[in-house]
Amino acid sequence: MIDKLKELIAEAEAFSAQSKDEIEAFRIKYLGSKGLTRKYFSEISKIAAENRKEFGQIVNKLKVTAEDKVNSLKEAIESQEEDKGIYGDLSRPGEPIALGARHPISIVKNQIIDIFSRIGFNVSEGPEIEDDWHNFTALNLPEYHPARDMQDTFFIQTDPDILLRTHTSSVQVRYMENNKPPIRTISPGRVYRNEAISARSHCFFHQVEGLYIDKDVSFADLKQTLQYFTTEMFGKSKIRLRPSYFPFTEPSAEVDVYWGLETETDYKITKGTGWLEIMGCGMVDPNVLENCGIDSKEYSGFAFGMGIDRIAMLLNQISDIRLLSENDVRFLEQFKSVL
Ligand code: DAH
């Protein structure tokens, strides 16, 4: 029996395993409640008294050897797993990355930029905290001009010359001051007005301003450019220009696009007329050109301005402007775009 035990000890010492299952099988075989160690311990009483001590020691050695083996194999396998943790299992399929969605305002803004860049317009930007000159005075809106009432303004209390811009038209002033014609630029950005917040209006929103200055620019160029835009943006080429008033353009017009009356939504958003107002525009007033250092006898130009939020709401049938700035992920996740 002693020989058999020595054999078992040698076997246990030589044992190796690749998996936790194999180690567990080994443990059960040697150390389990019906395992070899138990079995030999229970034989001790049958051994002749003079051999009992030696026998006991050998059975004990078997037990210790098996225990050491189980522990060292477990450790080895666990450290292998840790190594894997550092590098990952390189053959494992990649984990899906949750992609965010672009904001509906960014989507519309990028579409507008894309459409105008195809006909040579660049993108320009200006500060949101403006001075009176760039937001009003240079645009033919001197102090006390009644048209200033059209745009409720946030002024910085300590300095009435500093305000939050009420429109992106301020950027056309800056652009003309710093660039010589020919000019073709669009200026997207955030604007602010002191208005009560409701489903339809907010104290901040977004606009895109367009400006084209060159020799012999006519109203026909303006109309053609806008028609190109509505066709590309909405797939609608029928537009009309209604006479309007803006201090910085003369003549001025409001642009309506013919949306149609095919669906119930068409009825709703056009109030049953089929026409939808989308922007203001006009020929840049010669005074504005002169204010910005451009010779109005040599150059003429047109300008237009539109609200991005309004267009994003129209295209996505968003009924409350506040949703656009609440950053609710459930709302934002609905918008996906390549632009
Ligand atoms: N700045 C005007 C507004 O905020 C929009 C606008 C109208 C811009 C006509 C223009 C323009 O450049 O020609 O209501």
Image (cartoon, rainbow, N blue to C red):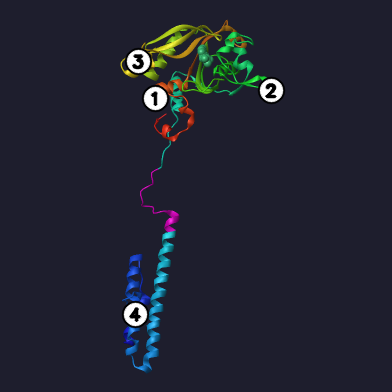
**Magenta span:** 83-96
Element at label 2: loop
Confirm whether residue 144 shows in the render: yes
Q: Residues within 10 Å of mark 1 (few under 14, many from 20)?
A: few
Which of the labelled discs sits on residue 158, or is there none? Answer: 2
Q: Earlier in the sequence, mark 4 or mark 1?
A: 4
Q: Kindly report the distance in space between the C-alpha atoms of the residues bearing marks 2 and 3.
A: 48 Å
Which of the labelled discs sits on residue 267, or is there none? Answer: 3
Quadrant where the image shows the C terminus: top left
The yes-or-no answer for disc 3 within 8 Å of ligand 1 is no
Q: Which residue is mark 1?
A: 316
The amino acid type found where label 3 is placed reads Tyr
**Does 243 sit above or below residue 154?**
above
Element at label 3: helix
Q: Earlier in the sequence, mark 2 or mark 3?
A: 2
Q: Which residue is mark 4?
A: 38
Q: Is residue 91 magenta?
A: yes
From the top left corner, tell me how far across and down residue 103 is, in percent.
Answer: 45, 30
Identify the residue at image location x=38%, y=85%. 58
Q: Residues within 10 Å of mark 4 (few under 14, many from 20)?
A: some
